[in-house]
Image (tube, rainbow, N blue to C red):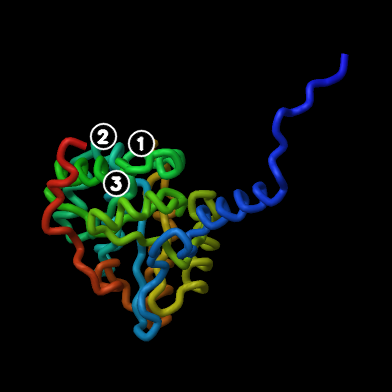
């Protein structure tokens, strides 16, 4: 019996275009599908430390505490599902002067790919507002993966999409000294540093290596003459939206 042949062969050009499109979607600095802020102004010696995937209970609060000991406030891009699981930690971050950003509700690429309305941004905004009474003005796409319709939804609601220009892969668990070296050596004026106080939507994830590296990260950046600021100050934007009633019922 002859083997069945595919009914339709995808032309090589189509495959090439699909591949190129996917590459742009996974590239955090790409501007093809919409505006993405990758760093702040390069003419001032300021750097923002940002932390993704929380809140993660005591690990998140330990990160915040280490920053506070050195007079620094961080920016935490939180996942809505984690906020609903741990609203107390989120409230503490806001009360203690850290900035909170929107990092989607489920932290899944497929939502950015398959949902034309990208309801994730509204659902996460609603969760954050319920927990802490604030409406984030900054959004970070999970894993930096972004699509045209996702970015249109984010902009339509008045949020600014932000990624990073320093990415030390801390979620892979490098030794603390190596993690600190990567950050300190890569930082430039206006840099946005990507770190993680959580991991996706898991609760209680061990972030001890980040905690061990964080003092050396802060001290090393200060020694290089950088001032560490929240992301809203780095970018010169409002920290929160005046209203997020558009997210009600999400």
In the foreground, 200 or 56: 200
Q: Secondary structure at mark 3?
A: helix
Check the picture and name the quadrant holding the N terminus.
top right
- Contact flag, marks 1 and 3 (Cβ < 8 Å): no
Q: CA distance from mark 2 to mark 1?
A: 8 Å
Q: Which residue is mark 2?
A: 85
Distance, label 3 to label 2, CA atoms, is 17 Å
Does residue 192 sit above or below 9 in this rendering? below
- Residue depicted at 26% across the width and 55% down the height: 156
Q: Dot 3 corresponds to which residue?
A: 121
Judge from the rendering whether residue 132 lies leftward or rightward of residue 71; answer left or right.
left
Q: Position of residue 189 (x, y in %)?
A: 40, 79
Extreme bottom residue here?
43
Is label 1 in a helix, a strand or a loop?
loop
Q: How many marks?
A: 3
Q: Are marks 2 and 1 in contact (CB under 8 Å)?
A: yes
Mark 2: secondary structure:
helix
Quadrant of the image occupied by residue 202: top left
| Quadrant of the snapshot with the C terminus | top left
Q: Residues within 10 Å of mark 1 (few under 14, many from 20)?
A: some
Going 40% across and 81% down the picture, which residue do you hit? 42
* Front-most of residues 70 and 1: 1
First along the sequence among labels 3 and 2: 2
| Residue pointed to by mark 1 | 203
Between the C-alphas of marks 1 and 3, the distance is: 21 Å
Q: Residue at x 14, y 55 (%)?
A: 95
User: Is label 2 or label 1 in front?
Assistant: 2
Tell me where residue 58 appears, x and y as whole percent. 29, 44
Q: Is residue 56 visible?
A: no
């Amino acid at each position: 019996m002859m083997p069945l042949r595919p009914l339709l062969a995808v032309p090589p050009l189509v495959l090439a275009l699909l591949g190129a499109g996917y590459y742009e979607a996974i590239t955090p600095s790409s501007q093809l599908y919409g505006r993405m802020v990758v760093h702040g102004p390069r003419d001032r010696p300021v750097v923002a430390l940002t932390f993704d995937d929380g809140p993660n209970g005591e690990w998140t609060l330990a990160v915040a505490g280490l920053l506070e000991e050195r007079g620094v406030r961080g920016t935490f891009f939180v996942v809505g599902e984690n906020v609903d699981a741990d609203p107390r930690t989120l409230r503490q971050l806001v009360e203690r002067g850290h900035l909170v950003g929107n990092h989607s509700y489920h932290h899944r690429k497929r939502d950015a790919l398959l949902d034309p309305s990208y309801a994730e941004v509204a659902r996460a905004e609603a969760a954050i507002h319920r927990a802490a009474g604030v409406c984030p003005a900054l959004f970070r796409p999970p894993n930096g993966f972004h699509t045209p319709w996702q970015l249109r939804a984010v902009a339509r609601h008045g949020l600014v999409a932000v990624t990073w220009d320093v990415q030390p892969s801390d979620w892979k668990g490098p030794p603390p000294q190596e993690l600190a070296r990567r950050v300190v050596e890569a930082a430039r004026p206006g840099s946005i540093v990507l770190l993680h106080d959580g991991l996706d939507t898991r609760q209680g994830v061990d972030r001890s290596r980040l905690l061990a590296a964080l003092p050396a990260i802060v001290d090393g950046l200060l020694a290089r003459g950088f001032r560490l600021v929240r992301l809203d100050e780095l970018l010169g934007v409002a920290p929160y939206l005046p209203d997020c009633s558009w997210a009600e019922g999400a």
